[in-house]
Image (cartoon, rainbow, N blue to C red):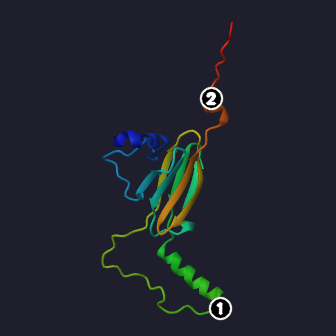
Amino acid sequence: MFASIYYPFHSALKPRSERGAFGRQENQKDNNSPPFNLNQLSDHQFQIDLLVAGYQESEIELSVEGKTLIVQGTPASVGHQAASVEHQAAAAGSQPVENANPKPNFLRQEWAVLPFKKLFSLEAHLQVEGAKLSQGVLSIFLKREIPQEEKPKVIPIHTVKN
């Protein structure tokens, strides 16, 4: 039952590794790649939700090359963020508060924001409509638009009377 419900959406959008293989391989794990959900909103509308907590909008790039949707995350370094805060304070004409953004002194760090690249193969006629970042979740909206000439059409049958 699950396979028949999931299959139409799964065939429309397939996650893939950078080497081009479709789907995930059991022994291959990309620790930097964020988890994601694939949602079918209607027959022709889909949504991908990626968990990208810790990333800012400026650190995420979304692009389409051919039939491949590419999502890349490149986090700014901690040093760059601290320099940016000092630069903003200087530009505003105020003095930065000492220890306002102290460098963390982690005793143990398991939470890391690392660079990632996630690829999705798009089926024919599947277009990216837009994206939004909210509360650490990047939502990407897709729509399938089949051209009129490729849609099935009904041919009327006329009865000829003798």
Q: Which residue is drawn at 46% across and 67% down?
A: 136
Q: Is disc 2 surrounded by few (<14), some (14 to 19) or many (20+) residues within 10 Å?
A: few
State left or right for residue 142 relative to residue 155.
Answer: left
Instruction: Quarter of the image for the C terminus: give it.
Output: top right
Of the pair 36 and 147, the residue shown nearer to us: 147
* Quadrant assignment, res 32: bottom left
Q: Can residue 20 be seen in this view?
A: no
Q: Residue 78 carries which label?
A: none
Q: Which residue lies furthest to the front in this view?
A: 162
Q: Is disc 1 surrounded by few (<14), some (14 to 19) or many (20+) residues within 10 Å?
A: few
Q: In this view, does 131 lie above or below 112?
A: above
Instruction: Quarter of the image for the N terminus: give it.
Output: top left
- Secondary structure at numbered mark 1: loop
Of the pair 104 and 143, the residue shown nearer to us: 143
**Of labels 1 and 2, the one closer to you:** 2
Name the residue beneath numbered marker 2: 153
- Tell me the amino acid under the disc marked 1: Gly
* Quadrant assignment, res 37: bottom left
State left or right for residue 112 relative to residue 151.
Answer: left
Q: Which residue is drawn at 52% across and 55% down?
A: 71
State left or right for residue 149 relative to residue 21.
Answer: right
State left or right for residue 124 relative to residue 7.
Answer: right
Of the pair 155 and 103, the residue shown nearer to us: 155
The answer to whether the residue labelled 1 contacts the one labelled 2, judged by CB atoms less than 8 Å apart, is no
Of the pair 82 and 126, the residue shown nearer to us: 126
Q: Is residue 75 visible?
A: yes
Name the residue beneath numbered marker 1: 93
Q: Residue at x 44, y 47 (%)?
A: 17
- Secondary structure at numbered mark 2: loop
Q: Residue at x 52, y 77 (%)?
A: 81
Point out the tag, 1 or 2, that comes first from the N-terminus: 1
